[in-house]
Amino acid sequence: MRKSHPVRRAVLATAATVSGIVLLLSLKPASDPGSAEAAGGAPPAAESVQGGARPIGDGTVTGDAAQTQYGAVQVRLTVSGGRITKAEAVQAPKGGQSDQITSNAVPRLNQAAVQTQSGDIDAVSGATYTSAGYKESLQSALDKARASAPAGTGGGDAAQAQTVTGDAAQTQYGPVQVRITVSGGKITKAEAVQTPKGGQSDQITSNAVPKLNQAAVQAGTADIDAVSGATYTSAGYKESLQSALDKAGG
């Protein structure tokens, strides 16, 4: 049997070692899960209630009761120094399984409202209806608190700006609700906080809503054109937008 030459064996061994190192490097994760935070790339802080909009007034304010499939949800806020210091649900679904869901979800929603200082909080898993009602009443309370803020609070443009959420407009495919930020008598931001979801509605919404938001800011009114292929969503958007403008004083 022919013996392998020593030099050839050495070359083959070296090649195998290099291949093994390359394979190990290729399996190494692209980044350490904590590397972004360690490098100073921590997630952005939650937006303050003031967040460029009119500051909220100190005191206690109760939002409008939001009706859900399992009962009403109503939120009360305590505000001090322009910040939410306490959130509580003065009404929540009761009876049967609702008692367990409420006792689990409401404390988390209260905590989230204080932490985020806004109505943009995540729903609690297993409490979809209660969470949606809570967010609606919370936003109502924030709107009332901003409306009660003394004129000139915060100074400059921030004192003149306000964020207002229009009433939800019911469409054939689901509700549409618009929130606007108004400063100096002009709409500076428009967003849909509720839109039709599921199936083809997801595609229609993702295409139509950004165009409607842009049109609202450009026009400064609810007199905007419907987006082709999104007739119902456009109609609901315009209706809720007009409601928000009415609340903002035109």
Image (spheres, rainbow, N blue to C red):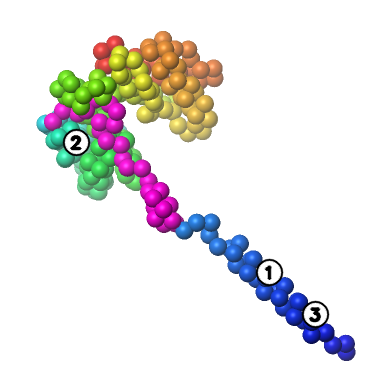
The residue carrying pointer 2 sits among few (fewer than 14), some (14 to 19) or many (20 or more) residues within 10 Å by Cα, namely some
The residue carrying pointer 1 sits among few (fewer than 14), some (14 to 19) or many (20 or more) residues within 10 Å by Cα, namely few
First in residue order: circle 2 vs circle 1: 1
**The quarter of the displayed image where residue 178 is located:** top left
In the rendered structure, find residue 8 and report the number of the disc placed on it.
3
* Distance from the alpha carbon under mark 3 to that under mark 1: 17 Å
Of circles 3 and 1, the one toward us is: 3
Residue 228: % across, % down: 54, 17
Amino acid at circle 1: Ser
Residue 197: % across, % down: 45, 32
* Distance from the alpha carbon under mark 3 to that under mark 2: 75 Å
Disc 2 target residue: 83
Q: Residue furthest left?
A: 59
**The quarter of the displayed image where residue 22 is located:** bottom right
In the rendered structure, find residue 19 and report the number of the disc placed on it.
1
Residue displayed at 47% across by 25% down: 210
Check disc 3 and report its element: helix, strand or loop: helix
Of circles 3 and 2, the one toward us is: 3
Check disc 1 and report its element: helix, strand or loop: helix
Residue displayed at 22% across by 41% down: 114
Point out the stretch of residues depicted in magenta. 33-58
The residue carrying pointer 3 sits among few (fewer than 14), some (14 to 19) or many (20 or more) residues within 10 Å by Cα, namely few
Amino acid at circle 3: Arg
Amino acid at circle 2: Arg
